[in-house]
Image: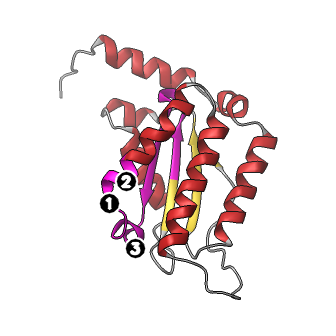
Amino acid sequence: MPLQPVSGSRVWRLLRHRWCDERDVARALPDDALARLEAAIHASEHQHTGELRVSVEAGLPLSYLWRRASARARAIALFGKLNVWDTEHNNGVLIYLLLAERSIEIVADRGLARKVPAAEWQAMVALLAPACRAGDFEGGLQQCVSLVGDLLRQHFPAAEGSAPRNELSNSVDLR
């Protein structure tokens, strides 16, 4: 297959993603911020039967960049890799932050996706985008965990007196 010419915007995207690395993730979300996010996930999961995962990635892998894949495509792939789809009530949610593009994606499993229209997820992402653009990654993720938790509590409330069941890790997945 002959090589295709590379456009300037494609080169810029490639460089932006390659320049971001784990040091950028550590600056964006230091250990104390990660601990607060994990505590927020833990507290949220005591109020509903859903499972929340947060994944933060510095930049897309080269294979994604080469085929011009979106942050959404990566979030969907991580949804599977992190087993968010594999919960008892099909009500797992992945909140994905891509630092190189300062974007948040939310992927909900079919149990919750049936109950929440796509427009509501898009509105939630649009509400959180300014925090990411401003570099307030912890604030944006905290707000997202809270909003998603509200939806899970509305559609999948925890039974009164039941012990919370933690099917997935509450730790923030860093890539």
The residue where tag 1 is placed is 117
Mark 2 near mark 3, Cβ–Cβ under 8 Å?
no
Q: Which amino acid type corresponds to the residue marked 1 in the rendered image?
A: Pro
Quarter of the figure with the N terminus: top left
Disc ID at residue 120: 2
Mark 1 near mark 2, Cβ–Cβ under 8 Å?
yes
Q: Which of marks 3 and 2 precedes in the sequence?
A: 3
Type of colouring:
secondary structure
Q: Is residue 174 visible?
A: no
Q: Which of marks 3 and 1 precedes in the sequence?
A: 3
Q: Position of residue 47 (x, y in %)?
A: 64, 72
Which residues fall within the magenta stretch?
Answer: 95-122
Q: Residue, x 45% and y 61% (percent of image)?
A: 80
Q: Is residue 172 magenta?
A: no
Q: Residue, x 31% and y 11% (percent of image)?
A: 8
Q: Residue, x 43% and y 32% (percent of image)?
A: 62
Q: Nearer the viewer, mark 2 or mark 3?
A: 2
Quarter residue 162 falls in: bottom right
The residue where tag 3 is placed is 111
Q: Which amino acid type corresponds to the residue marked 2 in the rendered image?
A: Glu
Q: CA distance from mark 2 to mark 3?
A: 15 Å
Disc ID at residue 25: none
